[in-house]
Image (cartoon, rainbow, N blue to C red):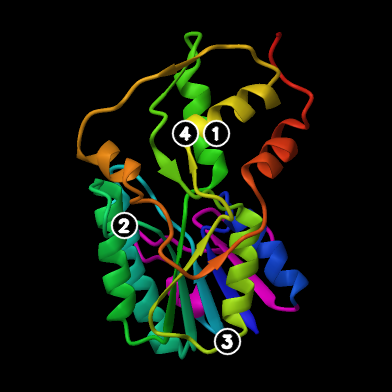
Amino acid sequence: MTVLVTGASGTLGTVVVPALTAAGHRVRPMSRRARPGWVAADLASGGGLGDAVRGADAIVHLASAPGRRQRETDVEGTRRLLAAAAGAGVRHALYVSIVGIDRVPLGYYRTKLATEAVVRDSGVPFTILRATQFPSLVDTLFTTSSRLGPLVVDPGLRVQPVHVQDVAARIVGLLGEPAIGQAAEVAGPQVLTFGEMARPWLAARGSRRPVWPVRLPGALARTVREGGLVGTGGSTGTRTWDDYLAERYGNTGCEPV
């Protein structure tokens, strides 16, 4: 099967492309910039999309542009992509979204929800796969919040981090099935609080920084504490937070103790 992958150079795309190739698919990575072996197309302008989808059996749609271009790229760009896909006879569009976008009050999530609506109304057979947060996001948040010394966290924030390899495996599996016409979920094997994740993160980095618990105000933090980012069902991956830390830091530490 020939599979067009948008967002192929991103965090998930760089794992999905080799996973699809290993599964025997002919992968067509897409980028806004021309590069050998890739197709060049721009979701925001629509340029090159007709050529990108021509001859494709399926699309794995990963591209997103948080920030000022988000609505033009995510919502309208998806509309352009799937209009071209419908004309080209694409049989399956798999859109990767986020668990909690219908519960967590965040502008980025509202745009992702609007993009899901575009996928549903496109006329192209579709599957929406909602994934929980990648552990790299928590890693980045912890790195940022510890730059001035202590690791400052709201210990009650709850997440269910899923490794990108597990998401990629779920994508490969879904492409081997007919489009389901609804949203599926993939989540990590553990529901953890930031308080539970902080100490292993510090240990993996070889750090003895103190942890300062700070309860964040507002509806966003309250919703996350109540489990707004936790999966509601569906498949779970196998790789844990500790697995991610061992892979990322090698248990050797990167800070003086």
Mark toward the viewer: 2 or 4: 4
The spot of residue 136 in percent (x, y) is 56, 40
Dot 1 or dot 3, earlier in sequence: 3
**Which residue type carries mark 3?**
Glu
Q: Gap between marks 1 and 2, in whole Å?
A: 23 Å
Residue at which label 4 appears: 194
Residue 76 in sight from this viewpoint: no
Dot 2 or dot 4, earlier in sequence: 2
Do the residues under discs 4 and 1 have CB atoms within 8 angstroms? yes
Q: Gap between marks 1 and 3, in whole Å?
A: 35 Å
**Which residue type carries mark 1?**
Met
The magenta segment:
24-53
The spot of residue 112 in percent (x, y) is 32, 59
Residue at which label 1 appears: 197
**Which residue type carries mark 2?**
Ile
The residue positioned 65% from the left and 15% from the top of the image is: 207
Which secondary structure, mark 3?
Answer: loop
Dot 2 or dot 3, earlier in sequence: 2
Do the residues under discs 3 and 4 have CB atoms within 8 angstroms? no
Dot 1 or dot 2, earlier in sequence: 2
